[in-house]
């Protein structure tokens, strides 16, 4: 492996619950029914996280819903800042974290390609050279001049993924978005990720598809309730997770955490 490209040193992340919206009476009931949350004004999504990822590694961030996986990706991409600790990231980061993130709904697909390029530090002239490949990979030739607001979630995902993998990133973050596409496009994306691996791109991968995790990753970081449980060989971690959560092919999750965290639109 090459040089260190991502480092977390004693990283903590706190969300202020009192500042988050409660949308209905049902939300209020669910929130106050969870005994341990009563009276709390904050939630520690991450607690004392320490790890490093070296250039060229493909690392899976694993755990139940609410364990802190997406929070780590948002910290790496600088969408949010840590409450405590130090994060070091070297290189251009391309992130696929949320469908439609970085897209302007009133702009066309073509215009949004240039907009995303600018956000990632890629000039218009360089993006023009990549434009045809981006559109072809996404399969969006017929709809590229239609405003993004008229795209389905799958169309947004295809275009977002295509932009992300064609801007020559040194680090790419992938958070569950491939689950939205159809099977053939998922395989196309996985093949492209494998090509990027061979080219030495560092990949941080979040997915509940444990088969894809084992196929793509050699290393895993297992989070549980915001803390690191294991950092090691991914197949062994997957085996331990299946035993611990009695995994039967469905998404790993803690229903209680989903009620409280989902209510407040925290994706951790």
Image: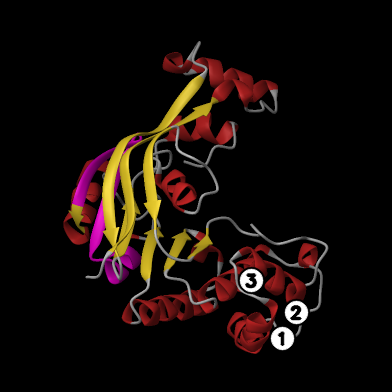
Count of numbered circles on the image: 3
**Which of these two is toward me, 251 or 134?**
134
Q: Which residue is mark 3?
A: 117
**Which of these two is toward me, 233 or 86?**
86
| Label 3–label 2 contact, CB within 8 A | no
Q: Which residue is mark 1?
A: 141
Looking at the rendering, which quadrant does residue 225 occupy?
A: top left
| Label 1–label 2 contact, CB within 8 A | yes
Q: Which residues are magenta?
A: 211-231
Up-down relation of residue 50 to residue 34 (above or below)? below
Q: Secondary structure at mark 1?
A: loop
Q: Which residue is mark 2?
A: 144
**Crowd around label 1: few <14 · some 14–19 · many ≥20 (10 Å):** some
212 drawn magenta: yes
The answer to whether residue 252 is visible is no
The answer to whether residue 232 is visible is yes
**Crowd around label 2: few <14 · some 14–19 · many ≥20 (10 Å):** some
Up-down relation of residue 186 to residue 224 (above or below)? below
**Residue 262, horizontal then vertical, whole percent:** 55, 36
In front: label 1 or label 3 = 3
Q: Quick one: quadrant of the N terminus?
A: bottom left
Measured in 3D between alpha carbons, the distance from the residue under mark 3 to the one under mark 2, in whole angstroms, is 16 Å
Q: Earlier in the sequence, mark 3 or mark 2?
A: 3
Q: Which mark is residue 17?
A: none
Measured in 3D between alpha carbons, the distance from the residue under mark 1 to the one under mark 2, in whole angstroms, is 6 Å
- Residue under the image location 39 percent in, 36 percent down: 254
Looking at the rendering, which quadrant does residue 137 occupy?
A: bottom right
178 drawn magenta: no
């Amino acid at each position: 492996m090459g040089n260190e490209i991502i480092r977390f040193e004693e990283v903590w992340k706190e969300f202020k619950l009192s500042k988050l919206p409660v949308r209905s009476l049902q939300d209020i009931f669910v929130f106050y029914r969870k005994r341990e949350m009563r009276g709390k004004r904050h939630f520690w999504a991450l607690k004392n996280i320490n790890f490093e990822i070296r250039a060229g590694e493909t690392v899976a961030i694993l755990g139940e819903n609410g364990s802190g996986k997406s929070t780590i990706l948002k910290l790496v991409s600088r969408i949010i800042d840590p409450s405590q600790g130090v994060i070091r990231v070297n290189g251009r980061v391309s992130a696929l974290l949320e469908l439609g993130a970085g897209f302007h709904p009133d702009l066309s697909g073509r215009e949004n390609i240039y907009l995303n390029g600018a956000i990632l530090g890629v000039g218009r002239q360089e993006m023009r050279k990549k434009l045809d490949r981006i559109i072809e990979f996404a399969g969006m030739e017929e709809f590229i001049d239609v405003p993004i607001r008229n795209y389905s979630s799958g169309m947004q995902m295809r275009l977002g993924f295509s932009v992300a993998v064609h801007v020559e990133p040194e680090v790419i973050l992938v958070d569950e978005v491939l689950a939205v596409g159809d099977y053939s496009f998922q395989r196309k994306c996985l093949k492209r990720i494998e090509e990027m691996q061979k080219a030495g791109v560092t990949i941080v991968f979040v997915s509940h598809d444990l088969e894809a995790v084992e196929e793509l990753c050699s290393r895993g970081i297992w989070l549980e309730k915001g803390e690191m449980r294991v950092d090691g060989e991914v197949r062994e971690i997957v085996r331990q997770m299946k035993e611990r959560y009695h995994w039967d092919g469905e998404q790993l999750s803690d229903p209680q955490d989903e009620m409280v965290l989902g209510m407040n639109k925290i994706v951790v």
